[in-house]
Each structure stands twice: as structure tokens, then as C-alpha cells.
Image (cartoon, rainbow, N blue to C red):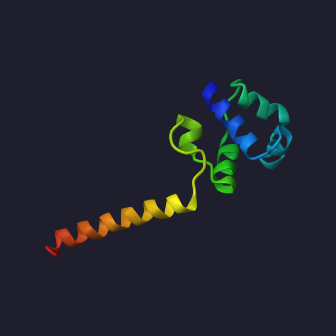
Amino acid sequence: MENIGLRIKNIRKLLNKSQEELASEVSLTKQAISNIETAKSAPGINLLSKLLLDYNVNLNYIIGGMGDIFITKDKTYESLRASLIKEVELFLDNRGIN
């Protein structure tokens, strides 16, 4: 949990938010944010969903330290595009169309 707190602190700083500002946005107290950042408590769904939905923060990064910190629209598009191409290729292969 300590690493999660440190990653949230890093994200908050990258967003140029104080603990008070972030706390206000997710209806928490400054102390609650401090407790999360120092691993005294775990982040709740409100904080995690706010970071994901409003700031495009990669939850894989927060929870597991994997991937980029932020999800970019370009990467989301490219991932979706690659997935769609694979689906079409599989569909065509199953139909015997080359």
C-alpha cells in the first residue's frame, strides 16, 4: 500500500494539486489524502475514479506500478484500432477469406 500512496502523491504533484485541492474534488479531507499518501489508509473508489475519469490516470499504474502514468487518447485509439484489426482478421480467417 505504501507504493500506491507514493504513486498517488506523485500524480497529485504532476497535476499541480495541493492535498486540499484534491481532497475537495473528491469530498475528502486534507488529512484523508495525507493518510493515503503515507500508506496509513487505502484510496477509495471516489479518489480512484476521479483520477481515472477526470485526469486520465492509468489505474494499472496506481495499483501495480505498471504502464504509463496517464492514458493518452492516442494510445487508447491505437489499442482499439489494433484490437479491431485483429477481430476483422480472425473473422475473415474463419470465413476462409484471405
What residue is rendered at 86% in x and 40% in y? 20
Q: Quadrant of the C terminus?
A: bottom left
Of residues 46 and 97, the one drawn nearer to the viewer in this rendering: 97
* Residue 32, x across and y down, in percent: 79, 33
* Residue 76, x across and y down, in percent: 51, 60
Answer with left or right where residue 44 lies relative to residue 64.
Answer: right
Q: How many marks?
A: 0
What residue is rendered at 60% in x and 44% in y? 69
Of residues 70 and 92, the one drawn nearer to the viewer in this rendering: 70
* One can see residue 1 in this view: no
What residue is rendered at 70% in x and 46% in y? 46
Q: Is residue 47 above or below residue 71?
A: above
Q: Is residue 48 above or below residue 78?
A: above
Q: Quadrant of the N terminus?
A: top right
Answer with left or right where residue 30 lies relative to residue 95.
Answer: right
* One can see residue 68 in this view: yes
Answer with left or right where residue 4 lies relative to residue 89.
Answer: right
* Residue 75, x across and y down, in percent: 51, 58
Answer with left or right where residue 40 lies relative to residue 24.
Answer: left
> Which residue ends up furthest to the bottom in the rendered image?
97
Would you identify the image quadrant in which residue 27 lies? top right
Would you identify the image quadrant in which residue 29 lies? top right
What residue is rendered at 17% in x and 69% in y? 94
* Residue 36, x across and y down, in percent: 72, 31
